[in-house]
Amino acid sequence: MNNIKNDRETFLPLVLQTEPLKMGKHHHRTVPLIPIASPLAGHRLTKKIGNLITKSAESKNLIYGVKDTGKALKKNEPGICVLGGNVTPMDVITHIPGICEEKNTPFVFLPQKEQISAYAQRTSPVACVVIREPNGQDYADEYNEILQEIQNLAATATQDE
């Protein structure tokens, strides 16, 4: 039997050092996505969101998992919902974008759920998170900038459909 270490020192560097996901016509590698993965963050926005996830996880301002995310959204918790674009089975998270639209909460898909867990410094895969609105934290400007980019991305995604 293989003895696989599941500690953060070996797992996180491997996930974060992998080749960046490439999407679009000029890139080599594509990732299979679920059909509802829209709006999908590009490479730059993914990195910005990742940095924000890391900062909010360090300040205990992040809600993990489908169940807790659903609860937070139903309670109108202000924040940004980030979902994995390759979650299987997709039925696990199909209700989350509907709740987000109902509650006017911005949401975005990252290409891989493994990116979310790596940025959140967790060893187990996380299908979705809610980045709570920062109250007095030092990353409030970064949060507002990303919020604006997600709203612009969502507006262009609805125009394309």
Image (cartoon, rainbow, N blue to C red):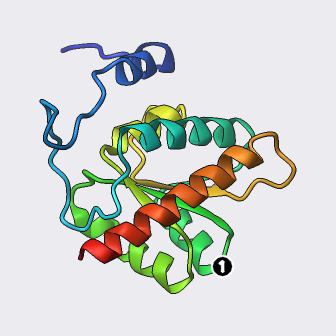
Q: Is residue 74 above or below residue 89?
A: below
User: In the rendered picture of this protein, how many numbered marks are placed on residues?
Assistant: 1
Residue drawn at x 82%, y 45% as measured from the top left: 137
Question: Does 18 sit left or right of 121 as displayed?
Answer: left
Q: Nearer the viewer, residue 1 or 106?
A: 106
Q: Quadrant of residue 63?
A: bottom right
List the single residue furthest toward the right.
136
Q: Residues within 10 Å of mark 1 (few under 14, many from 20)?
A: few
Residue drawn at x 25%, y 69% as measured from the top left: 91
The N terminus lies in quadrant: top left
Residue 145, percent from left and from top: 63, 51
**Camera sees residue 23:** yes
Residue 53, percent from left and from top: 58, 42
Q: Amino acid at mark 1?
A: Lys
Question: Does 70 sit left or right of 18 as displayed?
Answer: right
| Residue ID for mark 1 | 75
